[in-house]
Image: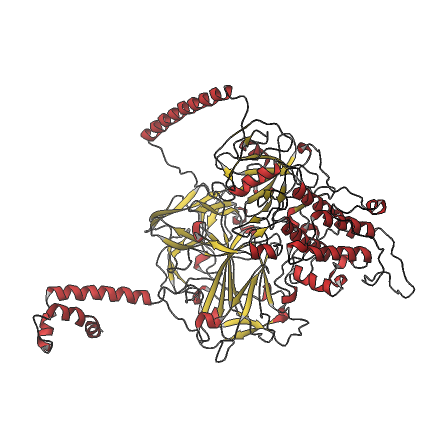
């Protein structure tokens, strides 16, 4: 080995050094010159480089520290891989508290669970020499019989400033022992502490693992899929810890720490399958082929990512299963925390192809909100049995279940979908507090603290005096946000340099400012139990003001700076308008870098909540709230009135830009109100706005707007047409789990309209309950709203008239003919009274036509803003 190394690395530098001194044919001179000091130095340098490269090229080796056997003086080797050190005789760490240990029967679970350390006061483990990097942390808990009933323990565990476990108890575990696993990124080397804080009488732990993971085990940035299905980058991936929720060996059996480089446990997937008949297990007898162990490229897998048994087993599609349509896939459902951000790692290894996988492609989806095409050939070339993986950051919904599916693309002949492994981790957002240390403070620290406190008190008194003095000379609080004049207001204004959309606006004293202290009081300091929604702008809380009024409080992420234009726009728009069918702005707060909006509380939530709830693979998932057709029409009429007022109100035209079912809210009487004006644009009537970027919600976007980047009122009309179809069909506007022609609701609905068979896609709850003439009028309205060109779409006043007329027809008896043998069949062949549609504003109408209308078009409300307040459920908000 030594000679080989010399001949590989010595000749080049030697030739450079000796070209003027030695003949290249003089072998003896070469051997003698090798002892030259310079050559020896170069030799040692190359030896070091070679050793370094060789160490990188070798497989990951589990570090020796830190593995702690808690409550014991003895050490033992676990899984034949690593040595757990008893914490009674620590060498590389210290413990702050005394322990109580109880020895168990050594034949039960092994040495790791024979003892425990019990903490009766806030305590910690301090690790002496922790380097920068990403660490895996595991806590082992087993409540064996002892003089302390370990089932009674309730405690917190924190590290890196985050609360890893909060009010933890082994009573909540489904099986024993309980192992909690986390990933932490440490940016500063030195000492590191793990804190245990008893919540009642004591805390305990049986064992702790804390070790460095392989290089680039996590990347700094990953793809983030928003709840609307949009893809962005999730930066600083490990800025908060990750908590393991599920680690699944798909198609295989249990994998114990003995067979995993990182001492992980993998469990089978059978208990998570949605339809067990849709998949079968596949096995590979040979070992998988790994491309690289030295800095693998993104997507390349190593043995550290998952052990061989994970990549040697898979679930594949059961092609013998009867298939009613092309909507055939394999789906798994995993329990997760509601409305939380999760990191998902999916493992693949093509063990189904025999020789070539160039044509093998299938789809991966999570929640059905998006689709990722999986192509083993693009990842590994024309090589089979080569592992690769995908990392995705995704938000969970309200169901508490995460659905992961694989299935063939649009080509049904390609059925070789497969999956080898799944890992799901939750981002830990809760901040933790280090327990107080039982140490004596020196007199110097006490004196210094007292002096510092005295100085702070004087500074506070001085600042308070200045503030009070200024208030005496300033009788009225001025509005410090860039807003326009409020409709009908006579408030004092002053100029400002701050702008919205590049146009300077006036600051007005609208009386809308709400103090941050009042916001904190209303939300109980932003209690997570009061959170009712979350969107791109921030979180929404239900609150009760000091006067007892219910409110909805939308709070941006503190200090992030995101959403500032939307924040200003919403205040500007809502301060100028007031209407019975528009959500009212009660107030706003802009203190300490906070951006908070306060709205009227809408008791019944969003329109979508009453149409469907996304569950499983079903095309339609009906909500427990069963609205009749008349009630749905009345809600659509109310929303149309609100949009019509925006387009033609006395304050000039306002284009909403984000009309969708989650932005139509319902009060306790099911009165509809349009909400969320952060994307709105205002300007003269019928003026076209040229936009540099497209904003809105996928599925509702006007195709002309996307092509030409020009936004008009007719874009709102298109979006509202999609909402009308959503109301009729009670299904999502985008559903990637359906066949290709059914994915987009607008395209699907138009195809049935052109066939004259809209009744085929009506919500099952409404079948036989819609007057055929009402349905025909409604379908005609939808078809005109969804025209490709904006000029071919009606104005909102025309849409409003049509909806009013459809409601009137619903309450009109349908004449029957003798040949009609069904009283429930909805058909397009039934006669409809001939009534001319009321023109927008130019053609006069008869008294009979006017009598069909039961609502006014411009229902401007004079209601006191303090009498209304709404819930903003922003499942699909900006």
Q: Residue furthest right?
A: 818
Query: In the rendered view, does 764 fall on the left or right side of 147?
Result: right
Q: How many marks?
A: 0
* Residue 391 pos. (x, y %): 48, 60
Residue 227, quarter of picture: bottom right
Picture layout, residue 858 above or below residue 810 = above
Q: In the rendered view, tell whether residue 495 sits above or below residue 71.
A: above
- Of the pair 579 and 792, the residue shown nearer to us: 792
Of all residues, the one furthest to the left in this rendering is 21
Give the residue at x 82% y 45%. 850
- Work out whether residue 49 can be spotted: yes
Q: Which of 146 and 618 is in front in this view?
A: 618
Q: Which residue: 12% across, 67% down?
A: 17
Which scheme is used to colour this image of the protein? secondary structure
Residue sticking out furthest to the bottom:
355
Q: Position of residue 340 (x, y in %)?
A: 54, 51
Q: Where is residue 801 in the image (x, y as percent from the top left)?
A: 76, 48
Left or right: 238 as drawn, with respect to 171 = left
User: Is residue 698 visible from the viewing direction of this image?
Assistant: no
Front in this rendered view, residue 414 or 277: 414
611 lies left or right of 102: right
Q: Quadrant of residue 704?
A: bottom right
Left/right of residue 394 with respect to residue 36 in the rendered view: right
Front-lying residue, 295 or 480: 480
Q: Is residue 633 above or below residue 548?
A: below
Measured as percent of width and height from the top left, residue 146 is found at 50, 50
**In which quadrant of the rendered image does the N terminus lie?**
bottom left
């Amino acid at each position: 080995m030594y000679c080989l190394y010399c001949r590989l690395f010595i000749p080049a530098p030697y030739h450079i050094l000796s070209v003027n001194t030695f003949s290249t044919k003089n072998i003896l001179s070469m051997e003698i010159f090798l002892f030259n000091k310079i050559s020896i130095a170069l030799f040692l340098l190359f030896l070091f480089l070679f050793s370094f490269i060789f160490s990188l090229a070798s497989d990951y080796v589990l570090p020796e520290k830190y593995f702690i056997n808690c409550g014991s003086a003895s050490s033992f080797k676990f899984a034949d891989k690593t040595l757990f050190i008893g914490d009674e005789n620590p060498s590389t760490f210290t413990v702050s508290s005394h322990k109580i240990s109880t020895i168990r029967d050594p034949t039960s679970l092994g040495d790791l669970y024979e003892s425990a350390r019990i903490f009766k006061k806030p305590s910690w483990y301090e690790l002496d020499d922790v380097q920068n990097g990403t660490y895996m942390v595991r806590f082992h808990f087993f409540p064996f019989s002892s003089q302390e009933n370990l089932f009674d323990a309730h405690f917190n565990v924190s590290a890196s400033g985050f609360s890893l476990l909060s009010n933890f108890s082994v009573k909540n575990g489904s099986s024993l022992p309980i192992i909690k696993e986390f990933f932490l990124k440490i940016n500063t080397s030195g000492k590191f502490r793990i804190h245990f804080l008893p919540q009642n009488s004591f805390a305990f732990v049986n064992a702790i693992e804390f070790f460095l993971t392989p290089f680039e085990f996590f990347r700094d940035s990953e793809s983030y899929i928003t709840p609307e299905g949009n893809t962005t980058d999730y930066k600083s991936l490990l800025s908060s810890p990750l908590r393991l929720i599920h680690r699944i060996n798909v198609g295989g059996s249990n994998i114990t720490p003995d067979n995993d480089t990182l001492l992980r446990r993998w469990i089978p997937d059978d208990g998570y399958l949605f339809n067990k008949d849709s998949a079968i297990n596949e096995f590979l007898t040979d070992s998988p082929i790994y491309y690289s162990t030295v800095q693998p490229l993104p997507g390349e897998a190593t043995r550290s990512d998952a052990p061989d048994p994970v990549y040697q087993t898979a679930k594949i599609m059961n092609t013998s299963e009867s298939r009613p349509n092309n909507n055939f896939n394999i789906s798994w459902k995993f329990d997760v925390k509601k409305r939380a951000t999760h990191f998902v790692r999916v493992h693949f290894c093509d063990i189904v192809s025999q020789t070539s996988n160039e044509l093998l492609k299938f789809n991966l989806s999570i929640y059905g909100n998006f689709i990722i095409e999986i192509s083993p050939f693009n990842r590994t070339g024309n090589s089979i049995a080569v592992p690769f993986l995908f990392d995705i950051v995704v938000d969970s919904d309200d169901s508490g279940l995460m659905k992961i599916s694989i299935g063939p693309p649009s080509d049904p002949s390609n059925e070789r979908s497969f999956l080898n492994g799944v890992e799901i981790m939750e981002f830990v957002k809760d901040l933790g507090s280090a327990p107080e240390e039982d140490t004596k403070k020196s007199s110097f620290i006490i004196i210094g603290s007292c002096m510092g406190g005295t100085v702070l008190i004087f500074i506070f008194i001085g600042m308070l005096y200045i503030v009070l003095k200024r208030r005496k000379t300033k009788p009225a609080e001025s509005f410090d946000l860039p807003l326009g004049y409020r409709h009908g207001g006579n408030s004092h204004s002053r100029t400002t340099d701050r702008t919205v959309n590049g146009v300077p606006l006036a600051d007005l004293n609208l009386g809308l400012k709400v103090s941050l202290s009042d916001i904190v009081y209303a939300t109980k300091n932003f209690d997570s139990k009061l959170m009712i929604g979350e969107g791109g702008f921030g979180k929404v809380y239900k609150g009760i003001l000091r006067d007892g009024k219910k409110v909805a409080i939308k709070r941006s992420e503190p200090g992030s700076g995101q959403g500032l234009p939307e924040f200003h726009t919403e205040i500007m728009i809502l301060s100028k308008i007031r209407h019975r069918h528009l959500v009212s702005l009660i107030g706003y707060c802009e203190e300490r870098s906070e951006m908070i909006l306060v709205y009227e509380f809408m008791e019944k939530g969003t329109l979508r909540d009453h149409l469907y709830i996304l569950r499983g693979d079903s095309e339609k998932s009906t909500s427990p709230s069963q609205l009749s057709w008349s009630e749905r029409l009345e809600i659509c009429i109310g929303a149309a009135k609100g949009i019509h007022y925006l387009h033609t109100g006395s304050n000039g035209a306002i284009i909403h830009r984000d009309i969708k079912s989650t932005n139509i809210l319902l009060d306790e009487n099911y009165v509809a109100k349009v909400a969320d004006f952060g994307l709105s644009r205002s300007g003269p009537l019928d003026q076209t706005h040229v936009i540099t970027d497209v904003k809105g919600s996928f599925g509702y976007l006007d195709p002309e707007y996307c092509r030409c980047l020009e936004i008009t009122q007719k874009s709102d009309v298109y979006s509202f047409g999609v909402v009308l179809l959503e109301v009729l069909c009670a299904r999502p506007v985008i559903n990637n789990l359906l066949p290709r022609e059914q994915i987009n609701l607008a395209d699907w609905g138009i195809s049935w309209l052109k066939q004259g068979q809209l009744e085929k896609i009506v919500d099952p709850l409404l079948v036989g309950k819609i007057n055929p003439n009402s349905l025909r009028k409604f379908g005609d309205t939808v078809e005109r709203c969804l025209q490709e060109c904006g000029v071919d779409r009606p104005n909102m006043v025309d849409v409003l008239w049509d909806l009013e007329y459809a409601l009137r027809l619903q309450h009109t008896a349908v004449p029957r003919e003798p040949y009609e043998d069904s009283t429930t069949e909805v058909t397009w062949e039934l006669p409809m009274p001939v009534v001319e549609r009321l023109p927008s504003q130019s053609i006069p109408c008869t008294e009979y036509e006017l009598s069909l209308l039961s609502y006014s078009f411009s229902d401007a409300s004079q209601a006191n803003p303090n009498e209304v307040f709404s819930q903003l459920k922003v499942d699909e908000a900006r």
